[in-house]
Amino acid sequence: MQDFLKDDLSLFAVPLFLTAIALEAWWSRSSGRSWYRGADTVASLSMGVFSLIVEIVPRLVAIVIMVKLHDISPLRDVVQRQWWAWVLLFFLDDLTYYCFHRANHEVRILWAGHVNHHSSQYLNFGTALRQGVGERLHKFLFWLWLPLLGFDPAMIITMISISLFYQFWIHTRAVGRLHHWIEAVFNTPSHHRVHHGSNVRYLDCNHGGMLIIWDRLFGTFSPEREGDPVAYGLTTNIESDNVIWVTVHEYVAIGRDLKRATTWGDRLRYLFLAPGWSHDGPDKRARVLRAAAGAV
């Protein structure tokens, strides 16, 4: 287990993250920008700690399963720690993250565990640590195919950590658009600002981790537009900094909808269709709203 902790780079990044938050908050205040609010930032940091605690058991269980799957992989003696294996894992891990992240936005019961990350009406380095709590329970299921391809669990955990480290730095408004080829390939602050937008044009777009190529390939990409400034937060904001309510509010909303539903088919739809579907009201799913607004 010591080897896995050693390979989890995120454990060593926390002091750097906290320093970056302090510096960005100081710069925001000294330059007259309102990018931070004290209670919001405290909630974000608390959510980060809460998610780490909740993740402990699912991560340990996932590592045990990964070890067993790697042991039965016919490729375990082929794929070791060669340079090309790391390059291949970089792309496969990022594709896995894209699928995991997109599912969290398009399956409501998974969204309930991820919505916490989008509940802040601010985008800053503090928001990066406002991690979804419920999503920690199912997150590692998406990565279980990689040990079957011969990648050992320590490599996988390391790549997951590298991705999370990278993603911290794209939660900022301080960096504008980068060179066009960087914007074409990598997930950037500009692309991720879109992801945190509640504007109809931006809903459920730009799910990439380190790369933006998957969004471009699978039709979930939207550029940041000067004429449509990003409105951060949810389509209906919860207006609360209470960590418990931030964590459970969507589960409570799902419970209310399940109670209102009159058939088991509708109850399943409330769980597994995208957020915004209703059996007795307007369809407010992101793709429906974008189509109605002609937003592309």
Image (cartoon, rainbow, N blue to C red):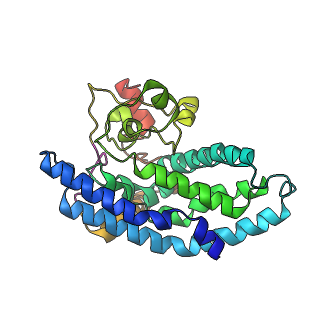
Question: At 54% from the left edge and 67% from the top edge, which residue is drawn?
Answer: 137
- Quadrant placement of the N terminus: bottom right
Does residue 12 show up?
A: yes
Q: Nearer the viewer, residue 192 or 295?
A: 192
Left or right: where 211 falls relative to 199: right
Left or right: where 14 falls relative to 102: left
Q: Quadrant of residue 158?
A: bottom right
What range is drawn magenta here? 232-239
Residue 113 percent across, percent down from the top left: 45, 60
Question: At 44% from the left edge and 57% from the top edge, which residue is drawn?
Answer: 114
- Please tell me whether the stretch drawn in magenta is mainly helix, strand or loop: loop
Does residue 238 show up?
A: no
Q: Nearer the viewer, residue 227 or 159?
A: 159
Report if residue 233 lies within the magenta region. Answer: yes
Count of all numbered marks drawn on residues in the image: 0
Residue 36 percent across, percent down from the top left: 21, 54
- Quadrant placement of the C terminus: top left
Report if residue 136 lies within the magenta region. Answer: no
Residue 276 percent across, percent down from the top left: 40, 46
Residue 232 percent across, percent down from the top left: 28, 45
Q: Nearer the viewer, residue 243 or 129?
A: 129
Question: At 43% from the left edge and 61% from the top edge, which residue is drawn?
Answer: 132
**On screen, 98 above or below 138?**
above
Question: At 56% from the left edge and 60% from the top edge, which residue is drawn?
Answer: 139
Q: Nearer the viewer, residue 172 or 109?
A: 172
**On screen, 119 above or below 259?**
above
